[in-house]
Amino acid sequence: MEIIVLIKQVPEIGEAKIDPKTGTLNRKGISLTINPIDLNAIELALQIKEEQGGKIRAITMGPESAEKALREALALGCDEAFLLTGQEFAASDTYATAYALAQLVTFLKPWEVIITGEKAIDGDTGQVGPAVASFLNIPILTYAIQCQLVNRSLFLIERTIESGVQRITLPPPFLITVTKGMNAPRFPTLRGKIFARQQEIQKFNAQSLGISVDSIGLSGSPTRVVKVENFKIERKGKILKDMDPVLMADQLVQFLVERGACK
């Protein structure tokens, strides 16, 4: 079974910082790692490989530093890793990112199943996976909570929908996005870490894939993130204690009236 896993490198939880001047995410000086839900995607790929054999290829788009996330994927059990990188990809929105990834996926044919996490914790859009499937013109199943092989040519997939759980059987090729609760990701082994350190990360840029620069980066992005802000929640309350209950009630009502909570 030929499997592709799409991953993303994101800031460690709690370490994301906003540049106060530009209002954009500042990735300098913070720890980066694999998007947590993408670990569930890797785990599913490993389970399929253990049952059916085959090869797993991990793919990401980003700066040279994204090589670290790919080596994490290799340490977990992926066989090959590919990095789509270059200044021309900078400022790509989800549409342009998905288009570029789809071109690399097409270049890497043949493959049967594409797996990715339902969303990334930094952008939280959940758009890239479905958009890649759209560019490739293959079926997409989002929010998968279970994926089982009926036989080599048929999968049974359960996914969450508004009214409950939907069960679908379909053959490859297809793309699924998995949820955090689908499985429990394994830890890398010592052998996996040694393999990851020795394995070559294969790198591509727009030119090597024949991608027009007008289709990626800022010029290829129909949406713009104008500004990102941190919202600080403050509780400006008033503590009432050791008072006459009637006086306390009067002050509470007055407090609510001043804030428009009651009349």
Image: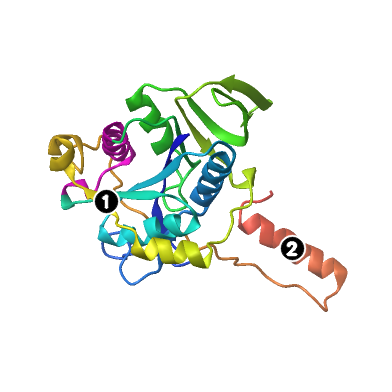
Q: Which quadrant of the figure has residue 246?
A: bottom right
220 vs 235, left or right, is left
Res 251 → quadrant: bottom right
Q: Secondary structure at mark 2?
A: helix
Write down the residue under mark 1. Answer: 202
Question: Residues under labels 1 and 2: Cα distance?
Answer: 66 Å
Locate residue 63, reporting x and y percent: 26, 57
Going 53% across and 41% down the picture, which residue do you hit?
49
Q: Position of residue 35 (x, y in %)?
A: 46, 54
Few, some or many C-alpha atoms within 10 Å of disc 1 (few <14, some 14-19, many ≥20)? few
Residue 16 visible within the image:
no
| x, y percent for residue 144 | 58, 35
What amino acid type is highlighted by mark number 2? Leu
Q: Nearer the viewer, residue 207 or 244?
A: 207
Q: How is the image coloured?
A: rainbow
Q: Nearer the viewer, mark 1 or mark 2?
A: 1
The residue beneath circle 2 is 252
Q: Which structural element holds mark 1?
A: strand
Residue at position x 60%, y 65% in the image = 235
